[in-house]
Amino acid sequence: MTPIAFHFNVAAPVPYLCRLLRKANHAGQRAWVLLPPPWAAELDAALWTFAPHEFIAHARHGCSPEALWRRAPVVLAEQVPPQTAAHWPLLINLLAPLPEGWQGFARLIEIVPQDEALKQAARQRWRSYAGQGRRIERHDASQASATPAVDPA
């Protein structure tokens, strides 16, 4: 059963994602990240520059050639193509709808920014997961000591 974690009160999603993806990368976990195009463009640029001596290899589904995104440790996308989940341990979601194919991933992390509309959409997803009997972990990003949690699988 896919473990689900909600990271809520995320004030700045792109820097938070950079730290989360760095942790996943250091743990050897490939990540598929669902997010709106403006945030994908911002994250794409940030992954090149967020740390002086560090770069996280990534690709954008729909913008990068298929051969590239199939090998990349991180893929930024608006959707999960069929049959993709089996090859990716981690799905990170910042989109409003329940992600298609999420059950095939080893782990799902929902990022909840402080925007009220995005919080409401996340509450709907929470209810949907809970209604399916899923156990949900909570991570409050507003805590001073909070760092993105990624469990090695």
Image (cartoon, rainbow, N blue to C red):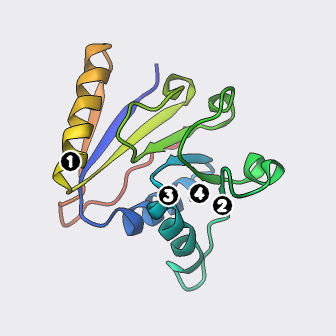
Of tags 2 and 3, the one toward the viewer is 3
Contact, mark 1 vs mark 4 (Cβ under 8 Å): no
- Considering the image in quadrants, where does the C terminus appear? top right
Q: Earlier in the sequence, mark 1 or mark 4?
A: 4
Task: Look at the numbered disc 4 and give the secondary structure of its residue.
Answer: helix
Inter-mark Cα distance, 4 to 3: 22 Å
Contact, mark 1 vs mark 3 (Cβ under 8 Å): no
Inter-mark Cα distance, 1 to 4: 30 Å
The residue at which mark 3 appears reads as 37
Point out the residue furthest to the right here.
67
Inter-mark Cα distance, 2 to 3: 15 Å
Q: Which mark is residue 25?
A: 4
Q: Is 69 on the left-hand or right-hand side of 117?
A: right
x%, y% of residue 61?
66, 50
Q: Earlier in the sequence, mark 4 or mark 3?
A: 4
Q: Earlier in the sequence, mark 2 or mark 4?
A: 4
Q: Nearer the viewer, residue 59 or 130?
A: 59
In the displayed structure, would residue 99 be above or below residue 26? Answer: above
**To which quarter of the image does residue 109 belong?**
top left
x%, y% of residue 35?
46, 51
In the displayed structure, would residue 39 be above or below residue 81? Answer: below
Q: What kind of residue is marked 2?
A: His
The residue at which mark 2 appears reads as 58
Inter-mark Cα distance, 1 to 2: 28 Å
Q: Residue at x 55, y 74 (%)?
A: 45
Q: Residue at x 79, y 48 (%)?
A: 66
x%, y% of residue 84?
67, 32
Task: Look at the numbered disc 1 and give the secondary structure of its residue.
Answer: helix
Q: What kind of residue is marked 1?
A: Ala
